[in-house]
Amino acid sequence: MGSRRGKTEKGWSWERALCGVIPPMISPLTASGEPDEAAIRKLVGHTLGGGCSGLFVLGGCGEGAWLTTTQRGIVIRAAVRAVAGRVPILVGLMLPTTGPAADAARQAADEGADALVVGSPYYYPVDAGIQERHVEAVLKAVSLPALLYNIPQCTHHALVPATVARLAGDERILGIKDSAGNFEVFQQFLALKCSRPTFMVLQGDESLAAASLLQGGDGLVPGMSNFAPQLFVALHQAARKGDVATCVELQNTITDLATLHSHGHWLPALKAACALIGLGNGHPSPPLARASEEHRQAIESILRRHQLLPRHRSPGLCKRHSRHSSGA
């Protein structure tokens, strides 16, 4: 795969890729629940066309914990083909224990992934030692690097800064995606850069996007970048320029857009927003159901308010901030 830190034979470097916006890609499904490869291709084109610098598949937004092994393989393969080496593809291993996670890591490597995303095992109580053994075993299964993933609201076990610091001693660990929503802990992850400057710290909580970048965070992994990638790319670029006023403006837009998650379950709501702009059909994996008509209409109203629907695309938010969005 080439140098982990330098430019790879694919033409990108990890520093540039992780210092940008990496959508946690939804997994578009057909009405029968199978991965929709055509919709995946369209989604990849939409996000990369919006200036995103990488792609994270099979995370929470990608329903990685609920798809079958076969379905996971289809999603990875379709994404790899659509990306065609332009940016790195990181594959989530959102599985409860080490054996299945290691198997999923091997599958990801076989299908052409560039890196893994691995967090805490879950279901049973675990401590820091168990978490470290889990990550080390997954890394041993393949030759790919990995991004750590702190999302205790799903795993019920946080990756605390002390544990992350020990894991960061392994150069195969690229950095961390922190979705816990605890800014104090995020700042402690940033402090790890003092001893390891190449350790990349990315924010997954959209409400903390601007603050995280202005405090020195490297990148964003926001679910809404599936349908509004240019918004987050504009924010990232504004933060890099130190343009606080624009960051505040864009964060206010993000905060208002995020109210769509309150209309039913957040995942069908996100998929409904994507479907409203022509990305997939809104079907989540069972036992979740599509957003109701009432919720879909509320989400449509939010997108219309920000001129994100296709018929408003020309004068809309993405055009308004296109001067910030030359690429990431």
Image (spheres, rainbow, N blue to C red):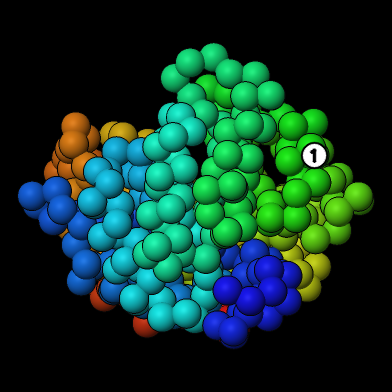
Three-letter amino acid code at the position of disc 1: Ala
Residue at 8 percent across and 49 percent down: it is 32
Is residue 192 toward the left or the right of residue 322 in the image? Answer: right
Residue at point 45%, 40% (across, down): 101
Up-down relation of residue 322 to residue 121 (above or below): below
Q: Residue furthest top?
A: 125
Residue at 80% over, 39% down: 165
Whether 271 is drawn above or below 280: the answer is above
Q: Position of residue 63 (x, y in %)?
A: 33, 44
**Left/right of residue 30 with respect to residue 218 in the rendered view:** left
Image quadrant in which you'd find residue 284: top left
Tell me the quadrant of the picture where the C terminus can be found: bottom right
Residue of label 1: 165
Report x, y in % for residue 300: 27, 55
Q: Which quadrant would the N terminus be assigned to in this image?
A: bottom right
Residue 192 visible somewhere in the drawing = yes
Q: Would you say 50 lies left or right of 44 here?
A: right
Tally of marks? 1
